[in-house]
Every structure is written in structure tokens, then in C-alpha cells.
Amino acid sequence: MKQPLAFLLRPQTISDIIGQSHIINDQNGLISRMLKYNYASSLIFYGDPGVGKSSIARALANDLQLEYAVFNAEIDKKQDLENIIKIAQNNERFIIIVEEIHRMNKDRQDILLQYLENGHLLMFACTTENPYFVINPALRSRANIIKLERITPSEMFLGLEKLVAEKKLPLIITSEALTLICQLASGDLRIAINILELCLNLYPAEEISTTIITSIAPTANLINFADGDEHHDLKSALQKSIRGSDVDASLHYFARLLASGDHEALLRRMLIIAYEDIGLANPAIAIHVKTAIDSFRQIGLPEGRIPLGLAIVEMCLSEKSNSAYLATDQAYEDVLKGKVYPIPHHLWDTSYASAGKLGNGVGYKYPHNFPNDYVEQQYLPKAMRDIVYYHPKLHSVYEKRINELYCHFTKKTE
């Protein structure tokens, strides 16, 4: 069986790695320094698919001239791990490369942990998920975490161009086509190599043009999966862009979330933004967003993007206020901290016949019996009578107006 091109092109040395210049450079690059001083320590390589986690782990082990074995936490058995550890005990320094370490259960992590202590066994672990969430803290503390960056189109272009020039990729390809491949790959080198493999096998004697690339890969690879950092970062970027009133950035992140297919996450976040960041500055926005969401669910794609996009733009252009959100959060936090004091008797329930015998509701003033339907009386528990949660933001027209009305009928000067 013919081996995949990605396997045949796997880097054997750090000098073959494409991208990751922040750790591979002659100044303060961590990997370069480790090679310069022949120093090895346990490392956790963390980043998106196709950025070179496994390749760097293997290439670094090769350059350090250390024996190593690979354990895939997703498919290999506990016995495989124990066999690797036995081999390691016969070496002064031995590296275990753990693929998909986020799939390694606690039992196997504990086995590995005890052998990392003596320094003979080193671990190069690879994961697409945040190590602070998926790796045992004790195991994590024995290693340095290295965040790998997504490979830029320019870095990928130079790397692939070098492979073509060195005849490792026997292709005739235009610069425009190679540039398009690097753009479509969205930072995943494996995707780019898979496209090139199709070109090698399906167009062996032809010059590869942008037309051919478009027929092979009509859309970009969207690096966004529900459990990954990219997905949560996109939601965060959307909210912060809307909060910052940047229409163009908001539409960009909205489009990426929409294209990812996780529509419910997008819809939930839009509602949250309406209440949290716009709030009393424009309370009607929440109704508009909900209407857009209902329209999207009824219409579906592709036209369903239109009402959602309208809501995104309107939220961006709306005045912003988080006063109600902050007040709610502070009140809730106080309750969780134990600030739960006796309710004033005049506010107690009087809906049953014998309530008066217990003194419930005695002294309560019914606001509708007073001018402007308002009368001053104590509502908060006595121990909290001076607490103020809500602080109006008077820069927005709507919140300023309702605050003026409130101050007018209560005769407050705030």
C-alpha cells in the first residue's frame, strides 16, 4: 500500500519544520536553545490540528539523538504504555511521545507520572485541547507547555515551495495555485499536503493551476470545533467586537461562527450580548435579536443569515450599557456569599387568612395609593439598607430618560 504523502514528507529534523518561528529561531527560540545546549525536558505541545505538534516532537528527539517511542492515547492499550516504560528503564534518557494526551485516562496518566520523577523518562506530549483543562495537574506540572501557532499562508508557501524546488514534491505548479492552497488550508499544513497529494495522483503530467485547485478544494478548511479553543475564542471575539461597536470585525466573526455549523452556540451568544452589553441602553434590541433567531430557524440557510446579520449590525450600532448586568451580578454574588438577612415584616406574605395574626404585612404602604404610584419605605433587609446595586449609565438616551423619569416621580437627584 502506498504511504500517504504527509507521512513521506514528515520532517526528520527541526530544520525541516514549517512555521513556529517563535520557538525555532537563533535568538531566544526555546527549541533552538534546547538543541544548542543539548538539553531536553518534558514538553507539552499544544495547538490546532496540522500545525506540527507530532512532527516537532519527533524531529526534536532525532536532533537530540535520544531513543524514543510513540504512545497514542486514543488507540494504544495500557500494556503498550507499560512496555515502553520497561524499555525506558534501560536507557539513561528516553523520550515517550504521547499522541492525543487529552485522551489518556487518569489511570494511565498516573502510571506515566511516577516514572517522570527520576529524570530517565521524558515526555513529549501532543494535544489539540487546552492542557489546563484536560491534563492531570500533577502531570502537567512536570512539563513545559509550548503553544504552537497556526502556520501563516506566507510560512506555508515558503515551506511548500522549498519542497517543490528540492523535488520532494515532483509537481509543476503555479505560484498562484500554491498561494491558493495555503489560503484554503487555514493554517493546517496537513490539509495543504493532502491537496497536493490529490494533484500528484490526479494531474501527474499537468501544470497545477488555480482552476484545478478550486475544483479539488472549493472551500476553505474551517478550523473550529466545539470543544476546542478556537470555537470559544470566536465567540469571545464576536462579543468583544460588538461591545466595542466594530461592525466589520463583528460581521467577520459572526460569519466564521455561522460557517462552522454550530448555530446554536452563535444564537445563544447573540442573546447574551443583547442583555449583557446593550441592556438598558436599548432594551428593545433583545426582542429584535430573538425575532432574528426565530426567523433564522424558520428560514434556514442560506437566506437565514440575512436576519442574523441585520441583528449583528444593529447591536454594533446600538448604544451600550451593562448597568443592569453589573447590578444583577453583584446582587447574586452577595447572596452566594451569605448576605441573606431577615425580610422586613411589612413585606411578608399576607395571602392567607391568618397572616395578620403573625404580624405579616403590618405597616406596609401600598404604592398605588400614593401620588405617582410611589411611596418611600424600606424594602431591603435592615442589615442591607444602605446597599446600592444599580448605578445608571447616563450616556445612553434611553437609560438617561428612564432614570430622569424615575428621579422625577421619586424626587431623587441622582
Image: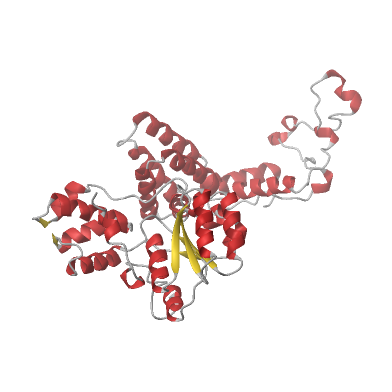
Observer-nearest of 212 and 201: 201
Is residue 387 something one can see in this rendering? Answer: yes
Tell me, yes or no, if residue 282 can be seen here. no
Identity of the residue drawn at 57% across and 54% down? 109
Residue displayed at 42% across by 31% down? 294
Residue 160, given in percent of the width and then of the height, sits at 24, 64
Q: Nearer the viewer, residue 414 or 86?
A: 86
Say which of 79 and 124 sits in front. Answer: 79
Q: Report the residue at 83% width, 47% height from top.
A: 383
Q: How far across and how far down the image is residue 108, in percent? A: 56, 52
Vertical order, 27 against 183 (above or below): below
Question: Looking at the image, is 5 positioned above or below residue 166?
Answer: above
Residue 73 rendering spot, x and y as whole percentages: 48, 51
Tell me if 136 is positioned left or right of 4 in this view.
right
* Residue occupying the far front of the picture: 90
Figure check: 177 above or below 297: below
